[in-house]
Structures are given as structure tokens and as C-alpha cells.
Image (spheres, coloured by chain):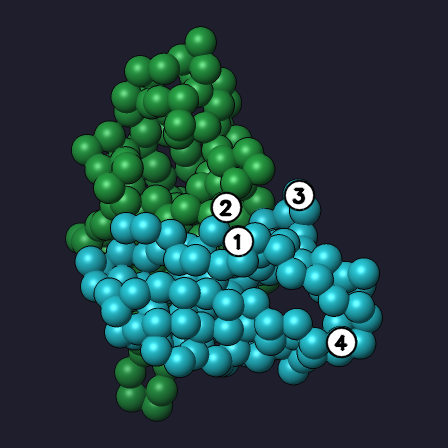
Chain colours: A cyan, B green
Amino acid sequence: QSALTQPPSVSGSPGQSVTISCTGTSSDVGSYNRLSWYQQPPGTAPKLMIYEVSIRPSGVPDRFSGSKSGNTASLTISGLQAEDEADYYCSSYTSSSTWVFGGGTKLTVL
Amino acid sequence: EVQMVESGGGLVQPGGSLRLSCAASGFTFSVYWMHWVRQAPGKGLVWVSHINGDGSSTRYADSVKGRFTISRDNAKNTLYLQMNSLRAEDTAVYYCARAGRYCSSTSCYTGDYFDYWGQGTLVTVSS
């Protein structure tokens, strides 16, 4: 199972919006709404930010939103804050009954 | 409060074995599916293995199939990962992660996402 494709890095200034893409195939992202996003600041464990494409767990700010079209999912962070600087990973369930992550995207807040 | 604490990592020679543990607390461990996810130094997250609530169903990534075995002891609220025939490319921080679960008025469902993570344990395979 190949990793989902994410851009290595994105950046934005405080207050701006950024979007991170996550591209898979018809065997994973395109076939299921079982797409989740994780935030990982340096040296810490990942934290769930979005699940089932667009659902935010309790406690996650509504500045974080998710969507999906075809084989590509997106995470949008609006009103960027310095604390949002971290690595972000997408994950999908697959037709092989396994799970796959994206390669990760480093978000820099300028 | 949900907590998961991994242990058992360390330095092991190529071809060696190691058993990781993940002690869980703060939730009804036996009803939750559990996963192992690893992260090589400076690299991304990679899913390794999954086990359902009663241990009757397991899944593995192709890279570890036949070498790693996931198991659980619900009486001890503990998840395990037995790692054999270790290779240099198995060097990573290993996280245990809980699968999300939600309930309607009539049924409960396990989601395909990871809602809580442990802090990880480092496994280094080197001679």
C-alpha cells in the first residue's frame, strides 16, 4: 500500500488560511469517507484533528475544516495562529482492510 | 482520563526480537480496537497493525507481516506487539493508538481513525 500524497510543506502568515491536500486512489480516499487528519508538533505524539472527512472532535477549534472530492481530501486551517505550526498527516482506510497515512506536511507560520 | 503508556523499546541487534507493551487506562479497553503506528526518525507515520476488541481479528502492513504479532490481554488492559527478525528499517518510535468509537441510541460503531495516542517507545535496530 503506497502512502497518500501530501505536499512536503506549506506556509502562511498569522490570520491567513492554508489548505493541505491529500491525494490517494480509488482504493482508499476515493472509495471511503474514512479520512482523518492528525497534527503533530515536534517531539510529541499525533493528535486527531478531523475524522470521517469533516468531523471535528470535541476541543478542536472550528478554524480546522476538512473536505473531499474524488481521490483528494483537503484540510483547511483558517485564521492561522503560531500554535498551528506542526506536521500534519492524513490517513485513510483502504480496500485491503488496512490503513494508510500520507507522507506528512510541515506547516510553517511565518 | 484516557491514557496509554508504551514500554519495551530499546536497542536490539538485526535479527533479534523485542516485545512492546501498551498499558491502557481511563476507558473500557476490551471494547476498543487498537493499532500500532510507527515513525522512523525524521520520517512520517506508518500504520503497522490492528487488533479488534476481543483479539479475534488482526491485520498487518505488508512490511511486517510474518515477523510481527499483535495481541492483547483485556484482563490486564494491555496491548502488545511481538517483533521478531528485526531489521534496521524497523527502527522507529512505535505508538499505540486507540480506534475511535461512537454510539447511536441502538448500536456502537468503530471508526477508522485514531482518537488517542500513547507517547511512543523508541526501537533501534543496530549492530
Do discs 3 and 2 belong to a common subunit? no
- Rounded to the nearest angstrom, the CA distance separating label 3 from label 1 is 15 Å
Q: Nearer the viewer, mark 3 or mark 1?
A: 1
Find disc 3 in the rendering and name its residue. A43
Find disc 1 in the rendering and name its residue. A104
**Picture coordinates of residue B47, whole percent (x, y):** 37, 49
Residue B32, quarter of picture: bottom left
- Front residue of this view, candidates B102 and A11: A11
Q: Residue furthest top?
A: B127
Secondary structure of the residue carrying numbered label 1: loop
- Rounded to the nearest angstrom, the CA distance separating label 4 from label 1 is 21 Å
- Rounded to the nearest angstrom, the CA distance separating label 3 from label 4 is 26 Å
Going by the numbered disc 2, the residue's amino acid type is Gly
Check the image and report above or below for B15 versus A25.
above
Q: Chain of mark 2?
A: B
Q: Residue furthest bottom?
A: B105
Q: Chain of mark 3?
A: A
Query: Tag 3: Cα neighbours inside 10 Å, few (<14), some, or many (≥20)?
Result: few
Going by the numbered disc 4, the residue's amino acid type is Gln
Find disc 2 in the rendering and name its residue. B44
